[in-house]
Image: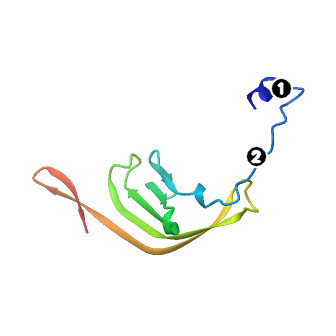
Amino acid sequence: MCRLVGKASDAYPPQLPIRQRPSGVSHLLPGSWVSQRCETRNYGVFLTRSVRFYDDRLLWERQEFYFADGLCQKLRFTLALSGTYRLDDKTSDLLEDAYNIDIQVSDSFERPFIHTFNNSFTYWVYA
């Protein structure tokens, strides 16, 4: 493949081989994803997220941490979701090289935090 790209020019772009799709895609999803930095949403919402997909029994979980500031240092509350998922073997009609996934939520909770002051120390308390 490197040779094909190296021999190409503006007038003759490389003709790369078509990538074969795997027969089953369930092995592609397990793993985790975490926000790299503080994310900003409309109406002054700041958050970080993490999502994890497990291979065994097709389980997933997601945590979102919501903050009062754009540096994601003053925690307001946490939202946690979990459940099961199912992947289609056929590709998406909307996105090339994407697969449809059916996600079902079985558990969720929100945990607010209260900012308190005590003897010059600042800490968070679960409400």
Are dots 2 and 1 in contact, CB under 8 Å? no
Local crowd size for mark 2, using a 10 Å CA cut-off: few (<14), some (14–19), many (≥20) = few
Image quadrant containing the N terminus: top right
Outermost residue toward the bottom?
Answer: 106
Q: Position of residue 7 (x, y in %)?
A: 82, 23
**Circle 1 sits in a helix, a strand or a loop, which is it?**
loop
Residue 78 located left or right of residue 96: left
Residue topped by disc 1: 8
Q: Position of residue 66 (x, y in %)?
A: 40, 58
Q: Nearer the viewer, mark 2 or mark 1?
A: 2
Picture disc at residue 96: none
Q: Image height check: is 27 above or below 70?
A: below
Who's the residue at 53% across and 57% down the image?
30
**Pointer 2 residue:** 19
Question: Which secondary structure, mark 2?
Answer: loop
Where is residue 21 drawn, in percent x and y?
Answer: 73, 53
Height in image: 112 above or below 27?
A: below
Q: Residue at x 19, y 52 (%)?
A: 122
Give how far apart the Cα atoms at labels 2 and 1 are.
19 Å
Residue kind at label 2, given as amino acid type: Arg
Residue type at numbered disc 1: Ala
